[in-house]
Image (cartoon, rainbow, N blue to C red):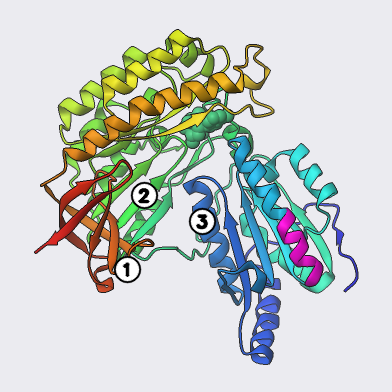
Amino acid sequence: MSKREFTDTNIDAGFDSDKIIELKNKNEQFFILNGRRKSYHILTYGCQMNEHDSEKISGMLTSIGYEETDDEKDAELVIFNTCLIRENAELKFFGKLGEVKGLKRNKPDMMVAVCGCMMQKDEIREKLLKKFSFVDIVFGTNTIHELPGLIYNVEFKNRKSIDIVENTELIYENMPKQRKFKYKALVNITYGCNNFCTYCVVPYVRGREKSREPEEIINEVKSLAQDGCREVTLLGQNVNSYGSNLEIGFTFAQLLREIDKIEGLERIRFMTSHPKDLTDDLISAIKDCSKVCNHIHLPVQAGSNEVLRKMNRKYTREHYLDLIEKLKKEIPDIAITTDIIVGFPGETEEDFLETVDVVRKVQYDSAFTFLYSMREGTKAALMVDQIPDEVKHERFDRLLEVLYPIVLERNSQCIGKTYPVLVESTSKTSENFLTGRTEHFRLVHFKGSEDLIGSTVNVKITNVKTFHMEGEIIN
Ligand code: 5AD
Ligand code: SF4
């Protein structure tokens, strides 16, 4: 095959074009000739937003006649859905891309596509196109729906394609989705972010916040419930500000109340909440709605007011702690999880100790902890007082020394109690074991047969670790 050249302009192939029919026909012929479908392998880095984007990519590929393979060596198409929130995500991706380069050398017709947050950054895209010229397709977070057209370009015109749109008001509804799980589903409610926390690249790569129309979301959840889905997670960078750009006034609390009415659905989760937008009305909705899980992921990021100010988080530690008090008072059974960044520029030992103090005060059920990672293009990357790596690591270790015993203690309080657990899958580590989560998002391993997957069973907790609990089914 001759070397593929990049088309120099963004194309607008669209999902609904005639090209899809041609592609489908070609893939059908492949099937007839080879007795198997063309296969794709997708590698997803980063958050649930990316995971869900990958479900849309899978949906589109299935609709044009591809099937998924777990092994990239077998794939006709390898797709990287990238993340650049922290440096290690970036490094992991480039390492893996290097491996695929070797594969492609032996299999020149293999197509390689790269998409996701990283591709929204001009410098990274340029570096990629220069250093990894074997990549055939590049698209971004706003152009997922263009993928069939991009594949068409490679298949029928032997042209590589790049399609990036920086910021868009448009939301593409009704993209086919191939969901990873039958019984739980991710559902976008907002895209993008307006908050510009000074450490974060998301507003630059996912654009301004836009909310889906409530009826689009409600209809999607209704149809999921009719298909047997038991749990939905409503996704947005800041779900609490849902509706702020909608012409009809509609809040996140209202949305929860509407989704709570949907028959067949058992659980509603949401990710992520921003403390500055957590209203009393929302707390009441969480309390009132029986299907909304008693769990909130409420990133604190830091416990010092000075650091919070420099992060542009728009709340103080006092406000955050007040919210926690209110949540615990209104919903005594609530589980609270968080995100914490250690080593933000200018963080002093005193600032750090204030973060540790918040962890002690809140008694988190679990937390994601991160070393501050300098991200080009963000305001924090320009701050002069960056913290040396050794200091960051040393603080990080000290934070975990406080956090883990708290998490273990919170889990220990579950011993002897029985919880409804939505069974998600078989356990990867032990035979005849299943895994699922309680409404508080605690992971539980227990013995049981595979046909229980998708149902809710009562599990009595017998033993706990920091990251999971063990139990037995009670009839
Ligand atoms: N460095 C470290 N952690 C970060 N996060 C976002 N950007 C950075 C960064 N530059 C963390 C925040 C956020 C989570 C998804 O990732 O804690 O809540
Ligand atoms: Fe990033 Fe802050 Fe937006 Fe979250 S709220 S995505 S941390 S800018």
Disc 2 marks a residue whose amino acid type is Thr
Residue on which the image places disc 3: 173
Instruction: For marks 3 and 1, give the one nearer the viewer.
Output: 1
Name the mark on residue 233.
Answer: 2
Judge whether 191 appears above or below 347 on screen. below
Which percent across, then down, holds residue 109? 79, 72
Span of residues in magenta: 98-106
Residue 35: name its quadrant.
Answer: bottom right
Q: Is residue 69 magenta?
A: no
Which percent across, then down, holds residue 341? 48, 26
Tell which circle, 3 or 1, labels the residue nearer the N-terminal end.
3
Tell which circle, 3 or 2, labels the residue nearer the N-terminal end.
3
Judge whether 439 appears above or below 101 on screen. above
Secondary structure type for disc 3: loop
Name the mark on residue 431.
Answer: 1
Q: What is the spatial separation of the Cα atoms under label 1 and label 2, in whole angstroms?
A: 28 Å
Disc 3 marks a residue whose amino acid type is Glu
